Image (spheres, rainbow, N blue to C red):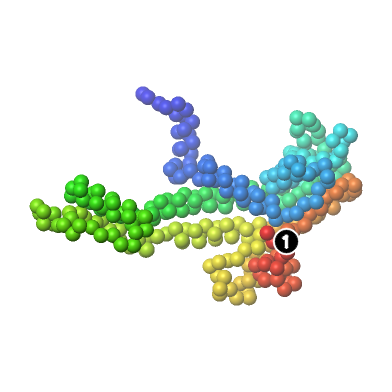
Amino acid sequence: MYTPLNYDQLTVAAGSTNPSSVKVYNTKSFAYWERSLFHRACNVLDFTLPQEWQGNIKNFFLYCLFKYGYVVIAKDAKHGVYFQPCTLSGFDFYYQPTRAIVTNPDLSVELKLHKDGELLQLTPDYLGIWDVITYYAAKLSNLDGAIDMSITNNKFAWVLGAKNKAVAQMLKKIFDLINNGEPTIIYDEKISDDPNTHDTPFQFLERQNLKQSYLTTDQLQDFRTILNNFDAEIGIPTIPNQKKERMVTTEADAETYDGCARSEIWFKTLQSSIANVKKIFPEITLDVQLRYDIQADYEEGGDANGEDNASRI
């Protein structure tokens, strides 16, 4: 029996997805949105890092912190004060990790936390935020395909049937003139009547209810809603466009606190762990600020959408 190359692997890949015809995660669209949302999330926090950690090293720092949720900061004679992704092990009285294992092509070491090194944490549960990114990236990727399909299907075209070649050529010429912007088109009236059957020489197939079937605007609105939901979850000011003109004060308050919930947790967790890092390495230049202080802007007179925040970009 004929089987294509890598048949077994393809069968496993297709059969383990339910429904098997829907591939959300393993697509270029999903990869695009995963990358895009990661960049948006990085913009929520403004880090002050040592001079030695700038450039590409800072990019690696942000990726590790958001992907894994923590990095270990330590010091040695060769690298100075450094950070690295690590594996945690051991438990103390409060079931917190006691050791960090670093495995690097240039360094392999096991560090005792609070003595040889300290964790810089983004989240209190030792997890990154990639679950948030993939959750929304999957929805945006899925809707992307629907929008592309809708745009293609809603391109309006005329469907005409000609009884002979002369009429077909005449219709093509008419539509050429229309597309060229001609305001008036005149054709020979004899063409309107078939000399043999005395019937109309062409037929027009009309697409009914075009306005009612045009879904792209609704899909684009849903697309913006999903993106707004992601922004609100990570702490970027948003305008709930479906309620923009009718939003009351209570709803605005709810939007304000909802939009800063996660970012406040990240900010406070980072501040606490930075304080612990500086106990061991007081010489380190390390700080973090919220780029969008939504709650502060709102309490100081800015609107619930953060429009008075000078750092809003």
Position of residue 211 in the picture relative to residue 244 (left or right)? left
Position of residue 256 in the picture relative to residue 113 (left or right)? left
Q: Residue furthest left?
A: 196
Q: Which residue shows up at 18% across the image and 59% down it?
A: 189
- Which corner quadrant of the image does residue 239 belong to? bottom right
Q: How many marks?
A: 1
Q: Which residue shows up at 48% across the image and 43% down it?
A: 23
Residue 295 visible in the shown view: no
Q: In the rendering, at what x and y percent does residue 288 appear?
A: 78, 54
- Which corner quadrant of the image does residue 291 belong to? bottom right
Q: Amino acid at mark 1?
A: Ser
Q: Nearer the viewer, residue 30 or 149?
A: 149
- Which corner quadrant of the image does residue 300 belong to? bottom right
Q: In the rendering, at what x and y percent does residue 303 appear?
A: 67, 71
Question: Dot 1: within a 10 Å radius of its alpha carbon, few (fewer than 14), some, or many (20 or more) residues?
Answer: few
Kindly identify which residue carries mark 1.
311
Q: In the rendering, at what x and y percent does residue 90 appear?
A: 77, 40
Figure check: 30 above or below 174: above
**Quadrant of the image containing the C terminus:** bottom right
Figure check: 251 above or below 33: below
Q: Nearer the viewer, residue 37 or 192?
A: 192
Q: Which residue shows up at 55% across the image and 66% down it?
A: 241
Position of residue 245 in the picture relative to residue 160 (left or right)? right
Q: Nearer the viewer, residue 118 or 49?
A: 49
**Quadrant of the image containing the N terminus:** top left
Residue 76 visible in the shown view: yes
Judging from the image, what secondary structure is the residue with disc 1 in?
loop
Q: In the rendering, at what x and y percent does residue 16 appear?
A: 48, 39
Figure check: 297 above or below 197: below
Q: Which residue shows up at 66% across the image and 52% down it?
A: 41
